[in-house]
Image: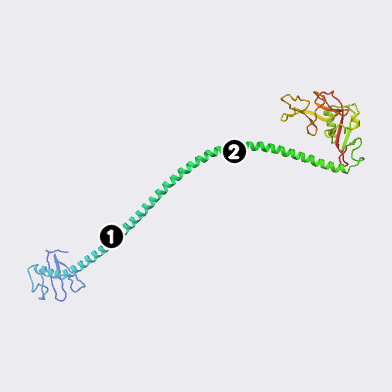
Amino acid sequence: MEQSPAQVSIQLDSSRPTVFLVVGGVSESSHSHHPHHATCAARPPHSYRYSGRRTGGCQGFSSSSGDVSWLLCHAGCWSRRWCIPVGLLTTCLLLVATVALGACYWQVSRSLQDTSRVHASEEGRLSQELRAREQSLEQTQLELAWAREQLQRAWHEGNISQLELDRLNVELRRVMGVLGKTEREVQEVQGRLNNSESTVALLRSCTAIDCCPSGWLLYRGKCLFISSEKKTWEDSRDECEKTYSQLLVTKSWSRWTVPTFLKNADVPYWIGLQKGSFPWYDYGWLEEEDPDSDGGSEAWFWVDGSLYERPWQSKSNGTCAIISRGSIKPAQCTGPNDLNLWICEKAAGPSLPFK
């Protein structure tokens, strides 16, 4: 495509305004769908025409020598025609934008004020709560100090109480031991009492024929066995235990109730009386001990555990007792040659296991 020198061609039509631009011999046209828009078409160079219709302030304006005054005139007319609507539209848009911005500013300002009031209210509430918490903390610290003091006092008293409790526990164990021993003694006494009651019941229904086994002698509610051989005191005691009996205990007999065969016999018999050592009793009143001496730790006891309550007629160093001619006398029983006859006794009754 060839290009010629720049040329401008403008054509105005009263019915449809048209602007022709010719550049270098090639024309480009722009048609507007609006009746007032310019339309560009190819026109020969250096040609324009005016229809003679009055448009704005430009009249009967033509040129054939390329003067652009007419073009500028019509451009100014079109500018003034669109300037007012565009200005009004711009003003409206600015006004709407200003109102919108003002409304936004007002909303933001109000929101900030509300937030500030809420913040101030929350700050006041938190300040009051903080002061209340501080007062509560001070009160708690005072109570904690008082509680610590009370705890120390209680701990000190607890230590003292623990020492007292330990002492009382020791005393309690001692008392419980004594009580247990006393209970055992009571049970033993109760057992003896029950046996005595049973013996009394048997004696009430007992006859002289069947109350004692063969070879035994009934005397004052007792069955007596008189041995015919001599043994030591310990062996004699064992022989009595084999027959469910014990060595003779005469604590309930007086001199006038001793059997005749014992009162007239010159033969000594072992009986159930022996000297024992019990350091927790003082039996200095016995004839075996010197009444003026300080210690009296040894005493005479029957084989049933009861104390011999009558003093000797004469002092002796014997450790066991015999009965001869109706009298009780001490005798030596520590050696294997200390041999005597013995007498066993047990309660009379037909239901006893005699063997």
Looking at the rendering, which quadrant does residue 65 occupy? bottom left
Which scheme is used to colour this image of the protein?
rainbow
Residue at image mark 1: 109
Residue 143: image location, x then y, percent: 45, 45
Quick one: label 1, few (<14), some, or many (20+) residues within 10 Å? few
Query: Which mark is drawn over residue 165?
Result: 2
The Cα–Cα distance between marks 2 and 1, rounded to whole angstroms, is 78 Å
User: SS class of the residue under badge 2?
Assistant: helix
> Quadrant where the C terminus lies?
top right
Looking at the rendering, which quadrant does residue 197 occupy? top right
Residue 52: image location, x then y, percent: 9, 76
Q: Name the one closer to the observer, 54 or 222.
A: 222
Left or right: residue 114 versus residue 76 is right
Residue at (77, 41) in percent of width and height: 190
Left or right: residue 345 versus residue 150 is right
Residue at (86, 34) in percent of width and height: 345
Amino acid of disc 1: Ser
